[in-house]
Image: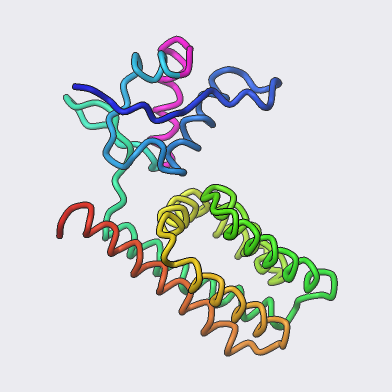
Amino acid sequence: MEYKDPGINLDVDDQSLPLRETVFQTLRKAILTGKLSPGERLTEIRLGNLLGTSRTPIREAIRKLELEGLVTIIPGSGARVAQITEEELQEVMEIRLALDALCARLASRRITDEERERLMAANVTFKEAVAKGDQIAITEADVDFHDVILSAAKNLKLSSILERLADNLYRYRFEYIRDEHRYDRLIREHDSLVQAILAGDEETAAKSAIIHVENQRESILEQIRAAYKI
């Protein structure tokens, strides 16, 4: 069987990290950004050749990725990138729907002047990333935008819960951002959320957050069904 070249390289930005951690972070990023596709088989020899490493750090990385839910290991079939399923999407988005609405509501109530400036700046940065069309930059800017809102909510428990969901949320966020036709709507949704939070309008901010998440869920659901021709 012939495999596509995913175009991944060993991330050696932080020279202080041991090789096994560098390999883990490289593969993790490749999965989250879709370079290693859902369902794609992960063989130690192939990945070792791609990254220029032995099989041992690859094996360790795959085990860690399985614990994070990003890889599934099937007896007799080996390791594969975890599929994005309708069930998992629904479960994660139901949680995000509730938490993002709460986050927007609390941010509207508690945001400081300094955080107002950060939120507006993050929204501008997001629009600039969209204009350049770099999907990874857009995804990172989207994460930063929502992180400002989370910071403004000032609830450590809420932050802790969302941190545990971070990988799943990033993966779904990136899948959504793959669809360039959604960009104009995405910008409008961010603008609506910013305006409501800055105005201290908790109800509108919560509703804007809900619409934002529901639209993302529907878009990814369409992509999943198209991929499996459901």
| In this picture, residue 92 sits left or right of residue 114 | left
Quadrant location of residue 188? bottom right
Quarter of the image for the C terminus: give it.
Answer: bottom left
> Hey, which residue is sitting farthest top in the picture?
54
Position above or below: 167 against 45: below
- Image point 48% across, 12% down: which residue? 53
In this picture, which residue range is highlighted in magenta?
A: 51-68
Quarter of the image for the N terminus: give it.
Answer: top left
Percent of width and height locating residue 173: 47, 57
Percent of width and height locating residue 124: 70, 66
| In this picture, residue 45 sits left or right of residue 78 | right
> Hey, which residue is sitting farthest front in the picture?
132
- Image point 41% across, 37% down: which residue? 35
Taking depth in this image into account, of 98 and 144 the one nearest to the observer is 144
Q: Is residue 224 visible?
A: yes
Quadrant location of residue 15? top right
Percent of width and height locating residue 221: 30, 63
- Image point 31% across, 51% down: which residue? 84
Taking depth in this image into account, of 169 and 134 the one nearest to the observer is 134
Quadrant location of residue 37? top left
Magenta stretch secondary structure, dominant:
helix
**Magenta stretch containing residue 155, yes or no?**
no
Taking depth in this image into account, of 72 and 123 the one nearest to the observer is 123
**Magenta stretch containing residue 67, yes or no?**
yes
Coloring applied to the structure: rainbow
| In this picture, residue 87 sits left or right of residue 44 | left
- Image point 62% across, 77% down: which residue? 191
Q: What is the count of numbered marks?
A: 0
Q: Is residue 157 visible?
A: no
